[in-house]
Image (tube, helix red, strand yellow):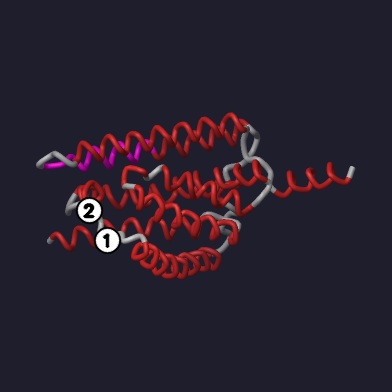
Amino acid sequence: METSALAQSASDRYPQAASPIHTILVLAAIGGWAICHKIFADQLSPAANPNRVRYYIVTLFYEWLLFVLVVAGLRRSGASVFIVLGDHWHSVRQVLRDIGIAAGFWIVAATLLWIFGWLLRIGAPGGNTQLMLPHRGIELTLWIALSVTAGICEEAIFRGYLQRQFMALTKSAPAGILLSAATFGAAHAYQGFRMVILIGLYGAMFGILAYWRGSVRPGMIAHAWQDSLNGVLASVMRH
């Protein structure tokens, strides 16, 4: 009886957002996403004039497709999308609070990433990663749109949905955060092994933030800002 009660308590604390089969489908879709990224990254390399616009548009489409897949699974299970996003904003003060949290998180995360990058001997972006960064004009506009999309979709998928599902599976918050972070890193395998480790650590930071805050909104803001800034700085440095 006592063991059963403990199991029930763990299930109540870490409820599933959707069925395990749906989670497998989402993971398979993320695997497809990683493969597509690798293919496009390899196609950018040998080209004299890489077609970044096509790459950005395809990535935009795929990320929103993954987001819709997650939402469809939630609705099929009778859950609201806000179970992975967190509570609504009810006032301007709440919005400003999350922006402030995002800003503080970004400063701390950027500092830690620099330290981890130095320890992993990761220098400035090069190779395929450098080729993906935008020039001016339509490329920069699409990059910012893609950065906002990544902030919304990736935080909802990895921290809002998968982290919750992994917590429900393992009945452990740390395990859920680590598994979600590992999946996030693996999804960026096209950037190389060391970057997978660094991005996985970055994902763990976002996971801790989402768990502490009970919402992915601060992470969405910080994620979108970081990606946008990378593109803007790359564009400015080229010119």
The residue sitting at the left extreme is 48
Could you say whether the residue bearing mark 1 is in a helix, strand or loop?
loop
Q: Position of residue 11 (x, y in %)?
A: 73, 44
Instruction: Say left or right for 77 vs 236.
Output: right
Could you say whether the residue bearing mark 2 is in a helix, strand or loop?
loop
Q: Which residue is drawn at 55% across and 59% down?
A: 208
Q: Is residue 123 magenta?
A: no
Amino acid, disc 1: Gly
Q: Where is residue 230 in the image (x, y as percent from the top left)?
A: 29, 59
- Does residue 204 lie above or below 98 as drawn? above
Instruction: Say left or right for 234 vs 35.
Output: left
Q: Residue at x 50, y 67 (%)?
A: 101
Picture disc at residue 158: none
Q: What type of secondary structure mainly makes up the magenta span?
A: helix
Instruction: Say left or right for 16 vs 67.
Output: right
For the residues bearing labels 2 and 1, Cβ distance under 8 angstroms: yes
Q: Where is residue 170 in the image (x, y as percent from the top left)?
A: 65, 44
| Residue that label 2 marks | 126
Amino acid, disc 2: Gly
Depth order, front residue of 168/114: 114
State the extent of the magenta-drawn residues as a range.
49-62
Depth order, front residue of 184/72: 184
Q: In which quarter of the image is residue 231?
A: bottom left
Q: Quadrant of residue 3?
A: top right
- Does residue 57 lie above or below 108 as drawn? above
